[in-house]
Amino acid sequence: MKKIFIILIVALAIKFNANAQGCVAIKSNGGYCMANHDSANKKQNFTLSINHRYFRSYKHFVGTAEQKQRTEGGTEVVNYAHTTDFNLNKTLKNGWSVSIDVPVIANNRSSLYEHGGKSRHSTKSFGLGDVRLAAYKWIIDPVRMKKANVQIGLGLKLPTGDYKYADKFFVNDSTNILGPVDQSIQLGDGGLGFTTEINAYYNIIKNLSAYGNFYYLVNPREQNGTSTARGSAPSVTAVRYGSDVMSVPDQYMYRAGLNYTVKHLTVSGGVRKECLTVKDLFGGSNGFRRPGYIVSVEPGVTYEFKKISAYAYVPFAVKRNRTQSVPDKNRTKITGVYAQGDAAFADYALNIGLTFKF
């Protein structure tokens, strides 16, 4: 069977920070993983995957409605997000494997409203993201079943990324204020999280197979104590509605599609959804977050050498939705006027990488 790789990213980010790709702030959080069909059928020792994800978010949405006046008026927030994931996987006996994922993140955020509203300035963040440890098991005996299989995974997301990363915000030509950067470019979320994964494939005919992935990050911690006031005192309204401190949200991703292989080349096509939830499965959901989701079509290509594989996947957004957060709902209830914040999304994300087999 040809080696077919399934790329899994969460957020991620996700750094994603995105969106799935943008201000929705889906972190990478070790959200990059690789389920190698061939590893279910052959004995391997170690696999090192190095994946880089880039996106530029700038289109603002409230719900599914694009706020075109932001870009037309030059007031849009622009995030440039780079995340490099180093994923080391060890194949064990009887279909078991373990992995560690270490993300390194570099972000740049350009805006007017965070710097007095009259001129555009930037804040940045760089460093280690949230490391993830995971264990995986193929459900069916991989030696006897090569046509199809399902893999489940459980993981631990560690709060290793700086969730209070600070930079200087412009006030005037002689004054800057040091404060925590926006949630969308924080390096971590401050929560000890738990991940669940399902990876599956089915070989339809000789060169054609189907794949599916599901990833969910459970974050029981409600808030991480990081202020959203950018170094200043929080506003009365932010405190009243509960958006003065950053939340620690759940997030999930799923993707499915087809792979067609010709010799060493595999061409992929599928759909992908990344979501930062309004409410968490466990724990409270108060605090500032930009919930929402992005649905994308995801073409990709993989080329295999003897011990190295190179790949590129580029999900293009077809639907973006910034949903109503808990503070939005609190404001709506208190004032009697419907409130819903916005978020900036990217048009596409670029995922490129190399996989080394040892």
Image: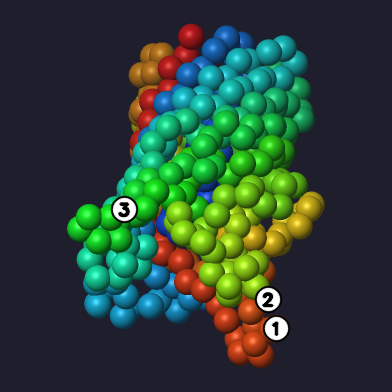
Q: Nearer the viewer, residue 89 or 244?
A: 244
Q: Are marks 2 and 1 in contact (CB under 8 Å)?
A: yes
x 30%, y 61%: residue: 171
Quarter occupied by residue 40:
top right
Please state if 283 lies on the left or on the right of 312 as rendered.
Answer: right
Q: Could you tell which of marks 3 and 1 lies nearer the N-terminus?
A: 3
State the image quarter where residue 136 is shown: top right
Q: Nearer the viewer, residue 239 or 305?
A: 239
Dot 3 corresponds to which residue? Answer: 176
Label 1: few (<14), some (14–19) or many (≥20) C-alpha neighbours in 10 Å:
few
User: In percent of the image, x 43 and y 17: which residue is there?
Assistant: 356
> Pointer 1: what residue?
333
Q: Can residue 137 be seen at all in this image of the molecule?
A: yes
Q: Nearer the viewer, mark 3 or mark 1?
A: 3
Q: Secondary structure at mark 2?
A: helix
**Relative to 30, is 71 above or below?**
below
The figure's colour scheme reads rainbow
**Which mark's residue is nearer the viewer, 3 or 2?**
3
Q: Residues within 10 Å of mark 3 (few under 14, many from 20)?
A: some
Q: Are marks 3 and 2 in contact (CB under 8 Å)?
A: no
Kind of residue indicated by mark 3 = Asn
Q: Amino acid at mark 2?
A: Asn
* Residue type at the position of mark 1: Lys
Residue 127 point in image, percent of width and height: 42, 32
Q: Which mark is residue 330?
A: 2
Marks 2/1: CA–CA distance: 5 Å
Q: Position of residue 349 (x, y in %)?
A: 38, 50
Q: Quadrant of residue 235?
A: bottom right
Secondary structure beneath dot 3 equals strand
Question: Is label 1 in a helix, a strand or a loop?
Answer: helix
